[in-house]
Amino acid sequence: MNLEESKQEVEAEASRATELVKVKALLKEKGTLVSDKKSIESLSTRGFGVPENENLLLTFFEALFLTSKEILEVFDEKTGKNVSFQDLLERFQSADKDAWVKYLVYRDLRSRGYVVREGFGLGIDFRVYERGEYGKEIASYLIFVIQEGQPVLIEELARALSYVLNLKKKLVLAVINRRGEIVYYSVSQFTLSENL
């Protein structure tokens, strides 16, 4: 073997070693389940999923995001067939009519380097952790997703703001327009004095 062949062989081995191994997961009723221990550790340290019986349960938007990045390969629990991004999205939309909008906001926040976790009701769609703070600190921001053209009751927004302020967090409105562009607004409360 000459020097050139040896060099090509070493380069081929290096590229094989750095190829991304897709994480395999099963599509279940309440989410996507990862059971491989190495994959669980890799995903959970990056803020994906919640532990469930020695497995990792991914939400639909996490599974969509990882599938779009070609990190996750999802198989249907019943048929064993590969589930495409579109099939996964349709399943998510059958459970939540705002699935596409939530996915777009989730993807945007993740692409900005934030760790994004599922919200916990009262209109709070996501919890967002400062970069590098996931696992060390609690979420700093709570995200309330609004679609342009869809009305939101002021009472609903006020209730969410009051709740967030009681938690000593920051409420952020993620407003998505018809073109899919997302603008973020910080929401705060102020009180007018009677002595104006």
Image (cartoon, helix red, strand yellow):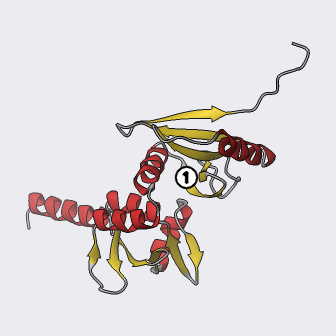
Q: Amino acid at mark 1?
A: Val
Kind of element beneath mark 1? strand
* Position in image of residue 141 (x %, y %): 65, 45
* Residue furthest to the right: 195
- x%, y% of residue 68? 33, 58
- Closest to the observer, 38 or 185: 185
Q: Extreme bottom residue here?
A: 78
Is residue 71 visible in the rendered structure shown here? Answer: no
Q: Residues within 10 Å of mark 1 (few under 14, many from 20)?
A: many
Q: Is residue 34 above or below residue 78?
A: above
Against 62, residue 171 (above or below) is above
The residue that mark 1 highlights is 115
The structure residue drawn at horizontal position 66% and vertical position 46%, both measured from the top left corner, is: 156
Residue 120 spot, x, y in % from top left: 65, 59
Residue at position x 54%, y 35% in the image = 184
Q: Quadrant of residue 77?
A: bottom left
Splitting the image into 4 quarters, where does residue 136 fall?
A: bottom right
Image quadrant in which you'd find residue 17: bottom left
- The residue located at (57%, 57%) in the rendering is 117
The percent position of residue 118, horizontal first and vertical second, equals: 57, 59
Q: Is residue 152 left or right of residue 60?
A: right
Q: Nearer the viewer, residue 16 or 189?
A: 189
